Image (spheres, rainbow, N blue to C red):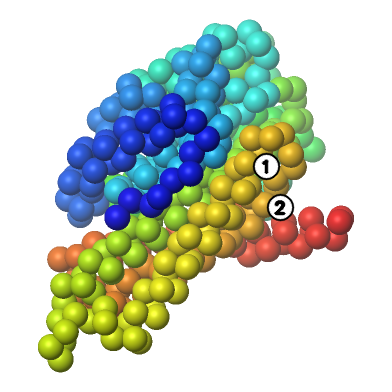
Amino acid sequence: MPAERLLPTTEAEDLISLVREIARDELKPRAAEAEEQERFPRDVFRLLGKSGLLGLPYPERFGGGEQPYEVYLQALEEIASAWMSVAVGTSVHVMSAYPLATFGTPAQRDRWLPTLLEGDLLGGYALSETHAGSDAGALSTRAVRDGDDYVVNGTKAWITHAGVADFYTLMARTSEKDISCFLAENGSGITAAAPERKMGLTGSVTAQLRFEDARVPADRLIGVEGDGLKIALDALNSGRLGIAACAVGLGQAALDEAVAYAKQRTQFGKPIIEFQGLEFLLADMAAGVESARATYLEAARRKDRGLPFQRQASIAKLVATDMAMKVTTDAVQVLGGAGYTRDFPVERYMREAKVLQIFEGTNQIQRLVIGRALRKL
């Protein structure tokens, strides 16, 4: 059943109702087959884009929805409850536009941001490398100035939308000490390796992204040389809120499936939901989902008020993704043998939950971020 929403405006209520309708009618019926066939649903992202859902937190003057993060994240949760690969892709796209929207010059924003938000284009975030995952400062991809361009060489790893994105927010080393941020169009010199064979999110493309003498115009440098790591980490703070919302949507879907099954499955002459052992398990699942939702919403409200939210974003990502792993595992347990089969979606939910504890900074990294923030209090 849909989560009860406390939304700040009537406009936001209407927006969430629209998202819920799209999720129910357009996304959920297609999810299982697309995931089974490992098929990337490019048309779905065009639908979301034309519906205004790929630019919700950005200003209207650039084609965005100008919604607070509190509202955008609840929309993302609704998408995740229907189709996790699409929700993660939406979060990645929004994060990929963040550096331009936040750190770009007025001329850069006017020139490129409307195109990124209008719905036809899809973004990727090219930060991680094989030896520079949690340690983003160790990346080795290089961008060397050559006249009016930068020439980029290197390989990025675990890139969502690699090969299917139209643009990439790229972090590359411009000197031994400096990492810089670029808005790179997909094109000559940029190729993707074969997609990774993953245990979950199989409808989402993840692959290495290779830059071989790729030329990026110098006017696509975001900020100044050396600002890249600061920009990347700031974008990740907001991206972690997106992943937290996705995790809550996945947990809600697993809870809904478990409750529905427990109501109709009978043993010893009565529905299994009436057995206290199972009832308590479901109660703990519900408590986990609602607690995680409250956590990400509090972090989002801090962001919307212009308050520091880095620690709260890490807490939300940690709490929500650990919750999703537990709740989806418990959902399989509620369904018993049926839950272990592909006849029901909970086994897929369980497989999808695992990666949430890993990307946008592992949960071990989140604990480091939180601990360091506490030292400064």
Q: Which amino acid type is shown beneath numbered disc 1?
A: Arg
Other-residue count near label 2 (Cα within 10 Å), few / some / many at <14 / 14–19 / ≥20: some
Question: Marks 2 and 1: which is nearer the front?
Answer: 1
Q: Secondary structure at mark 2?
A: helix
Q: Would you say residue 325 is visible in this rendering? A: no
Horizontal side, residue 101 vs residue 265: left or right? right
Element under label 1?
helix
Q: Residue at x 21, y 38 (%)?
A: 26
Q: How many marks?
A: 2
Percent across and percent down for residue 153 are 57, 32
Residue under pointer 2: 311
The C terminus, quarter of image: bottom right
Left or right: 135 in relation to 204: right
**Numbered label attached to residue 302:** 1
Instruction: Tell me where residue 272 appears, x and y as whole percent.
Output: 23, 81
Please name whichever residue, 244 or 100, is drawn nearer the observer in this view of the structure.
Answer: 244
- The residue positioned 26% from the left and 64% from the top of the image is 257
* 141 is higher (above) or lower (below) than 149: below
- Say what amino acid the circle numbered 2 marks: Arg
Q: Is residue 110 left or right of residue 30?
A: right
Residue 145: x percent and y percent?
68, 19
Asked whether, in this view, residue 230 is left or right of residue 116, the answer is: right
Q: In this rendered view, identify the residue nearer to me: 325 or 262.
A: 262
Labels 2 & 1 near each other (Cβ < 8 A):
no
Q: Earlier in the sequence, mark 2 or mark 1?
A: 1
Q: Could you tell me which residue is drawn at 47 percent across and 68 percent down?
A: 287
Image height check: is 298 above or below 113? below
